C-alpha cells in the first residue's frame, strides 16, 4: 500500500523523532510518497545542517504529479461544509484529491484531513495512542 505522508507527519518525524518506526518502515519498503504541495509546505523552512539531512531524505522519495481538478475542489469544499468540516484549506483539499486520484493511503495527524479522507472514501492511517492504525477504505455518504 503506497502512502502519501502529510507534511505534519514529516515535521514530527524529523524534528521530534515521532512515528520513527512507522515512517522508517515506509521508507525501507519504498511505500512513502509525497507531492509538490507537501514539499512546498516543508522545504522553505529548511535552514540548518540537520534539516539538510531532511532535504536529502525527502528528495529521494517519489513525488506524485498533481492534476488539480478545480471543479472537483469546489464540490469538495461544498460537501465539506455540508458535512460540518469547516476548517479546510485549499491545499489540504488538493492533497486529498491527489491521494484519491492515485489510490494512495493518506498518513496524517491533522484531524480535518482525516475527516476529509473519511468523507471522500480515501484510505487513511489514523494515529491513536502513540501508534498508527490502518483503516479500511470508507465509502462517501
Image (spheres, rainbow, N blue to C red):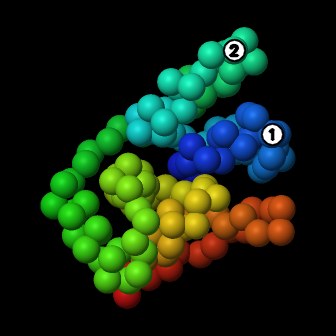
| Residue 99 spot, x, y in % from top left | 43, 55
Residue drawn 35% across the image and 38% down it: 65
| Residue 98 spot, x, y in % from top left | 37, 52
Depth order, front residue of 33/96: 96
Residue drawn 65% across the image and 47% down it: 9
Whether residue 86 is visible = yes
Please tell me the numbered disc located at residue 84.
none
Q: Mark 1 points at which residue?
A: 16
Residue 83 picture quarter? bottom left
| Residue 31 spot, x, y in % from top left | 62, 44
Q: Name the residue under label 2.
A: 48
Marks 1 and 2, how far apart at CA? 15 Å
Whether residue 29 is visible = no
Local secondary structure at mark 2: loop
Is 68 located above or below residue 120 in the figure?
Answer: above
Local secondary structure at mark 1: helix
Q: In this view, does 98 lie to the left or right of 50?
A: left
Q: In this view, does 109 lie to the left or right of 77?
A: right
Is 4 located above or below residue 115 in the figure?
Answer: above
| Quarter of the image with the N terminus in it | bottom right
Q: Do the residues labelled 1 and 2 touch (CB within 8 Å)?
A: no
Q: Residue furthest front?
A: 87
Residue drawn 50% across the image and 73% down it: 115
Crowding near the residue tagged with mark 1, few <14, some 14–19, many ≥20 C-alpha atoms within 10 Å: few
Q: Residue furthest left?
A: 71
| Residue 60 spot, x, y in % from top left | 59, 24
Q: Is residue 46 left or right of residue 24?
A: left
Residue drawn 41% across the image and 39% down it: 37
Amino acid at each position: 500500500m503506497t502512502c502519501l505522508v502529510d507534511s505534519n507527519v514529516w515535521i514530527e518525524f524529523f524534528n521530534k523523532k515521532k512515528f520513527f518506526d512507522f515512517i522508517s518502515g515506509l521508507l525501507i519498503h519504498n511505500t512513502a510518497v509525497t507531492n509538490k504541495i507537501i514539499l512546498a509546505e516543508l522545504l522553505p523552512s529548511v535552514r540548518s545542517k540537520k534539516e539538510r539531512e531532511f532535504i536529502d531524505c525527502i528528495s529521494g522519495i517519489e513525488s506524485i504529479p498533481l492534476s488539480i481538478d478545480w471543479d472537483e475542489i469546489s464540490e469538495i469544499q461544498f460537501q465539506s461544509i455540508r458535512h460540518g468540516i469547516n476548517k479546510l484549506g485549499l491545499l489540504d483539499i488538493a492533497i486529498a484529491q491527489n491521494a484519491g486520484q492515485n489510490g494512495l493511503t493518506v498518513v496524517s495527524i491533522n484531524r480535518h484531513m482525516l475527516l476529509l479522507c473519511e468523507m471522500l472514501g480515501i484510505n487513511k492511517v489514523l494515529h491513536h495512542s502513540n501508534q498508527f492504525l490502518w483503516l479500511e477504505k470508507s465509502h462517501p455518504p
